[in-house]
Amino acid sequence: MTTTPGIDRPLLLGTRRSELATTQSGHVADMLRARGLEVELVLVTTEGDTNRAPLSRIGGTGVFVSALRDALLDGSIDLAVHSLKDLPVEQPAGLVVAATPSREDSRDVLVARDGLTLESLPAGARVGTGSPRREAQLRATRPDLDVRELRGNVPTRIATVADGELDAVVLAGAGIRRLGLTDAVTQWLEPTDMVCAPGQGALAVECRADDAAVRAHLEPLDDPDTRAAVTAERAVLGALEAGCSAPVGAFATVADGELALRTFAGPREGGETFREEVTASLADAPDPLSAAEALGRRTGTALRTRGADALPGVGEVPQPADRQSSKETE
Ligand SMILES: NCc1[nH]cc(CCC(=O)O)c1CC(=O)O
């Protein structure tokens, strides 16, 4: 096997260098290899990997994704694998998410000292997260916690608990699973306690929109239920004109053609929160993805009308977006 049908050379898969990124990319490469294709990984450095300033300060959609997208557009790679939650809602011209493979666990987890949980952490415990969404929900249940800014890759963030620098950190369970670090988890946070980020736990496999041969190889990796769920979640963010730095959570599931969507919006420092839980049947919809998108948009609009409009990060990313203005913080 030396060629890829329709391409006559190995597929070039661009990935960030972090262990999580190369693991996720390796997972997609293996799915393609299982289909008989030859795949080579190409390591690409992004600004998010080299700049250690808080993400809320460097901001910019592109910190994790723009170098990969530049490599796609200039033809040096054929496909890129992203964490879907790191992608801005607005899709750049010329590129397409050709596949959203079956989603990993979407829940956030608590990694705490001494087996502690959200309920048993002592008053004033130092809990690390760089995510306004996680901070807002931590404060909603435990206003007494001392929430601290935290960044860095997954193993580094876990190490702050082992080192005694923090009592706990909140992370995406998907990343922990993919890195084989689940032993560190002291609590899986259910959506009732912590609504995940739109797209959390899902991957996006992106390629050039006009590259029919690569698209045809990627499309079989798509999981339609995952795609419908993340479409609804991201539509919430779109209706809120919010980027990933907004304190907004959205989590959807699809079971037996029924889409269930749970959302959260609230201030980072604690205060009034907004939640909507809605369902819609996709089974009879002529176009399930449009139905998922419409439900997400309606729900985002409802959150806005009820007061989420006043939250920082909401109403900051015009739709259709000036892509450079959205931010990501997770
Ligand atoms: N930018 C950070 C990021 N992007 C994707 C993941 C984990 C995997 C996922 O959420 O799908 C993480 C780490 C985290 O939030 O703990």
Image: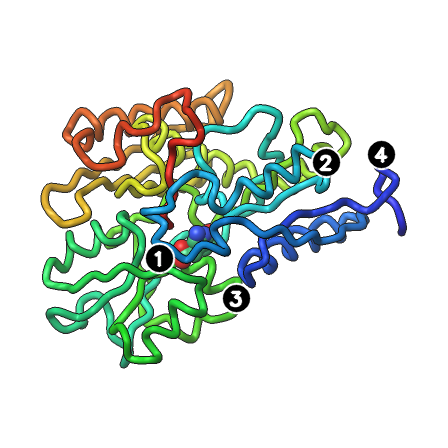
Give whichever of 236, 247 is nearer the camera: 247
Secondary structure found at label 4: loop
Q: Mark 3 belongs to which amino acid?
A: Leu
**Chain-order first, disc 1 or disc 3:** 1
Picture residue at 35% right of the left edge, 36% below the top: 243
Give whichever of 73, 271 is nearer the camera: 73
Q: Mark 1 belongs to which amino acid?
A: Asp
Task: Residue 101 in the image: state x and y as whole percent.
Answer: 58, 45
Please tell me the numbered disc located at residue 179: 3
Which residue corresponds to mark 1?
108
Q: Nearer the viewer, mark 1 or mark 2?
A: 2
Task: Residue 95 in the image: state x and y as whole percent.
Answer: 60, 30
The 10 Å Cα crowd at callout 1, few under 14, some 14 to 19, many 20 or more, is: many
138 horizontally vs 300: left or right: left
Which residue corresponds to mark 4?
6
Secondary structure found at label 3: loop
Q: Quadrant of ligand 1?
A: bottom left
Mark 1 CB in 8 Å range of ligand 1?
A: yes
Picture residue at 45% right of the left edge, 33% below the top: 231
Q: Nearer the viewer, mark 4 or mark 2?
A: 2
Picture residue at 56% right of the left edge, 56% below the top: 21
**Chain-order first, disc 4 or disc 3:** 4
**Chain-order first, disc 4 or disc 2:** 4
Please tell me the numbered disc located at residue 75: 2
Residue 259 visible from this viewpoint? no
Mark 3 CB in 8 Å range of ligand 1?
A: no
Secondary structure found at label 2: loop
Distance of label 1 from label 2 (alpha carbons): 36 Å
- From what the image shows, is residue 103 above or below residue 185? above
**Chain-order first, disc 1 or disc 4:** 4
Q: Are marks 4 and 2 in contact (CB under 8 Å)?
A: no
